[in-house]
Amino acid sequence: MSEESNEIVHLLTQMKLTWNAGDSAGYAGLFTEDADYITFFGLRLKGRQAIEDTHRELFKTSIKLGEGGGGAPSIRHLTGDVALVIAGGTSSVDGEPDPSRASVVTLTALRTTEGWRFASFQNTRVSRP
């Protein structure tokens, strides 16, 4: 795996750690200032501040991120500074894993002056057709 891919995997790990710690500022800091963020139910957030504000409230709940589903994330470098990332995940409520909450997350990773950050996030719940 390339050094850039390792840095993106680290960013994904930080995403899970900040979420589970309830750190809305740390979580939002993983995104670019002008990031586009779309939740599994279609809410569109625009920008780091909106991500932080929304997650501050969400993190008051007992939802935690579990182990990623579907194996290692797929990272495809589109240019030296842009990568398409597809990762799977699950979450738990009150400490109990909830398979009905499995999702696929598509992100755009961008190399910035702050390091790699996510410029877009789309969470899609896994369901049967």
Image (cartoon, rainbow, N blue to C red):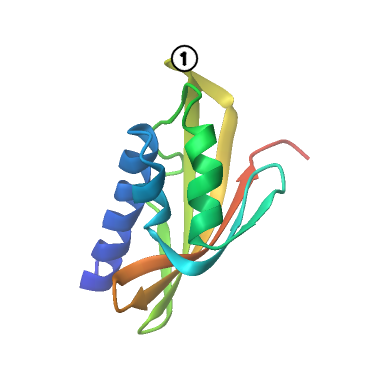
Determine whether, in the image, residue 26 is placed left or right of residue 37.
Answer: left
- Secondary structure beneath dot 1 equals loop
- Residue found at the very far left of the displayed protein: 3
Determine whether, in the image, residue 45 is placed left or right of residue 7.
Answer: right
Judging depth in this view, the residue of 49 and 22 nearest the camera is 49
Q: Which quadrant is the N terminus positioned in? A: bottom left
Q: Residue at x 26, y 55 (%)?
A: 10
Judging depth in this view, the residue of 100 and 114 nearest the camera is 114
Using the image, determine if residue 63 lies above or below residue 24: above
Percent coordinates x, y for residue 38 in the rendering:
63, 54
Judging depth in this view, the residue of 21 and 70 nearest the camera is 21
Q: How many marks?
A: 1
Q: Residue at x 21, y 71 (%)?
A: 3
Using the image, determine if residue 51 lies above or below residue 18: below
Q: Residue at x 42, y 53 (%)?
A: 28
Percent coordinates x, y for residue 47 in the rendering:
54, 63
Percent coordinates x, y for residue 24 in the rendering:
41, 43
Label 1 crowd bin: few (<14), some (14–19), many (20+), radius 10 Å: few
Image quarter of residue 19: top left
- Residue found at the very far right of the displayed protein: 129
Q: Amino acid at mark 1?
A: Asp
Percent coordinates x, y for residue 117 in the rendering:
38, 66
Q: Which residue is mark 1?
A: 94
